[in-house]
Image (spheres, rainbow, N blue to C red):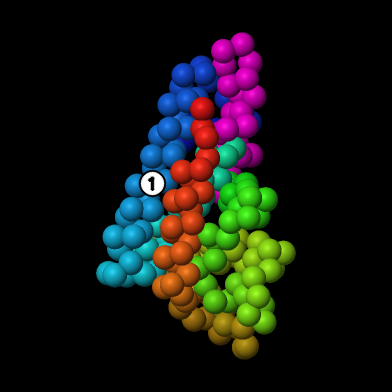
Amino acid sequence: MLKNKPPHIDIPEELWKEMMQNVRDGIFRKLKAARGSIAIDKDVAAGVYVYAVEEFGKLLLLKKATALNGMRRVIYRDEFVNHNRKFKAAFDWFQANGHDPLVISETWFVDGLFAWDIIEKRFLAETEARLLIFYSDFTYDDKNQMIVIERPPVVALDKLQKAIDGLDMATNSLTIL
């Protein structure tokens, strides 16, 4: 990560292309790792999948870097290293392109229906909780504000497998150069 997180960076066109390919390759590696770990631990697989979604958002943000005389301007602080912005970019792309690979939990359905306006809020909230698989923490329970161990959301295995496949297809469909 760059020191002091500058607002933007200007990089040569070739470095920009190399970074886009690097991010895309990283998404495929993460999806392969998620597929390979489902049978061992679906929560770990879901955590890796969430990182792949974030990188998909990064790829989308990189694609729109402004061209300036053989250079590309990357919005660094507010996009490239901003987790919420990357997830939002991925989420918006999925919605605009008719994909629903974000759904990995039954709690994202309302009365059995998939609702984009509700999913966005739940996805961003559950994303942070999903990463609990990689660390442990405390939280307050909903009822009497007692301190309890925070647990990641429950993963629906069939939805996770479909989500991984959907993100793989979405990434393959994305032209990067």
Residue at horizontal 39%, vertical 42%?
26
Query: Residue tagged by mark 1?
Result: 28
Mark 1: amino acid: Phe
Q: Is residue 84 magenta?
A: yes
Q: Horizontally, is 132 left or right of 33 in the view?
A: right
Whether 57 is among the magenta residues is no
Residue 98: x and y in percent read 63, 55
Name above or below for residue 135 compared with residue 167.
below
Task: Say what secondary structure mark 1 lies in.
Answer: helix
Q: Nearer the viewer, residue 114 or 119?
A: 114
Which residue shows up at 61% across the image and 83% down it? 142
Q: Looking at the picture, does residue 144 appear above or below residue 117?
A: below
Up the image or down, 23 lies above or below 103; here it is: above
Residue closest to the eye, 40 or 150: 40
Q: How many marks?
A: 1
Q: Would residue 35 appear left or right of 141 to someone viewing this image?
A: left
Range shown magenta = 62-85
Q: Residue at x 37, y 51 (%)?
A: 30
Question: Residue 42 location in percent, x, y?
Answer: 36, 70
Left/right of residue 30 with respect to residue 175 in the rendered view: left
Which image quadrant for residue 22? top left
Report x, y in % for residue 46: 42, 64
